[in-house]
Amino acid sequence: MISTKNISLLPDRKSLETICKAISVLDAIMCQEWQYRYYSYQSEWDTNEQCFQMRNGSGDEMHILFREDGCAINGFAHEYEQHDKAKLTANLPAIFDDFIFGEPVASIGTTFCLWTTELKNWQVGQIEDFDDHSEEMLNILDGQPQTYLDWATDYFEESYNESGIPFDTVSKIYLGQILTKEMVLSIVEEIEDWEQLESDLKEISYPYDFN
């Protein structure tokens, strides 16, 4: 399982970006109300920066910053003791300072932090022998469609078709294939607002063709 103590299992940052977009698209299909989604993605977070966000509605959050020159992950588990952030971010490259020490991350908090300025080669600061809740947040990023499908089947309950969430459609979205109405309607019986979904897909920067 992926965690701060097992960072070698994290995908490279380009693959990670694809995964984050995929699960954000799937969340947008099953939940059109943004505030109730678990995963979301902003492709224009800031100049030349994109950001993935996880919110569980109970106080746990994870933000992943994507830049051309690197990627940084900040996780916060509200039930866990916050340790010295200076240690958690020891040797953090300066290009991530605004993200990790600026808003909204500064107000949210930090219980774990990872980063890379290369394609892979993930780094962590000084971690101690305590549970930072990273495994529970990071495991969804393993790149396996079944991992998301298992989670979403439980989390969204009756928001999808009675026949279940089709593995084939989830797999296609994980591969970044163009989203069609047929793919959407294989997951949910209907979409109340197609324009809203299009807006969400544009925000994520995910390709679609609803013609």
Image (spheres, rainbow, N blue to C red):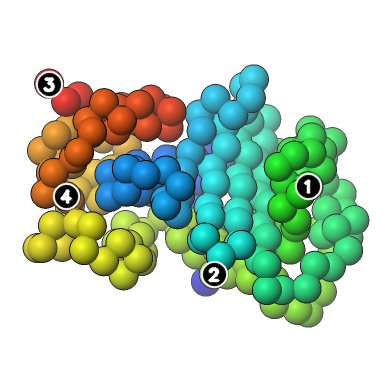
- Nearer the N terminus, badge 1 or badge 2? 1
- Residue, disc 2: 136
Crowd class of label 1 (few under 14; some 14 to 19; many from 20; radius 10 Å): few
Q: Earlier in the sequence, mark 4 or mark 3?
A: 4
Give me the disc on residue 49: none
Q: Secondary structure at mark 3?
A: loop
Hey, what amino acid is under mark 1? Ala
Cβ–Cβ below 8 Å for labels 1 and 4?
no
User: Which residue is labeled 1 in the image?
Assistant: 106
Residue type pointed to by label 3: Asn
Which image quadrant is residue 25 in?
top left
Q: Amino acid at mark 4?
A: Val
At label 2, counting other C-alpha atoms closer than 10 Å, the crowd grade (few under 14, some 14-19, many 20 or more) is few
SS state under label 4: loop
Gap between marks 2 and 3, in whole Å?
39 Å
* Placement of 26 over or under 145, stated as above or below: above
Q: Do the numbered discs 1 and 3 sit on residues whose CB atoms are within 8 Å?
A: no
Q: Nearer the viewer, mark 4 or mark 3?
A: 4
Query: Residue, x 37% and y 32% (percent of image)?
Result: 200
Q: Determine which residue is flagged by label 4.
A: 188
Q: Residue at x 37, y 44 (%)?
A: 33
Q: Say which mark, if any, is on residue 211.
A: 3
- Whether residue 116 appears in this view of the structure is no
- Contact (Cβ within 8 Å) of mark 2 with mark 3: no
In the picture, which quadrant includes the C terminus?
top left
Q: Rounded to the nearest whole Å, what is the CA distance between mark 4 and mark 3?
A: 18 Å
Q: Sequence order check: which comes first, mark 4 or mark 2?
A: 2
Kindly report the distance in space between the C-alpha atoms of the residues bearing marks 4 and 2.
27 Å
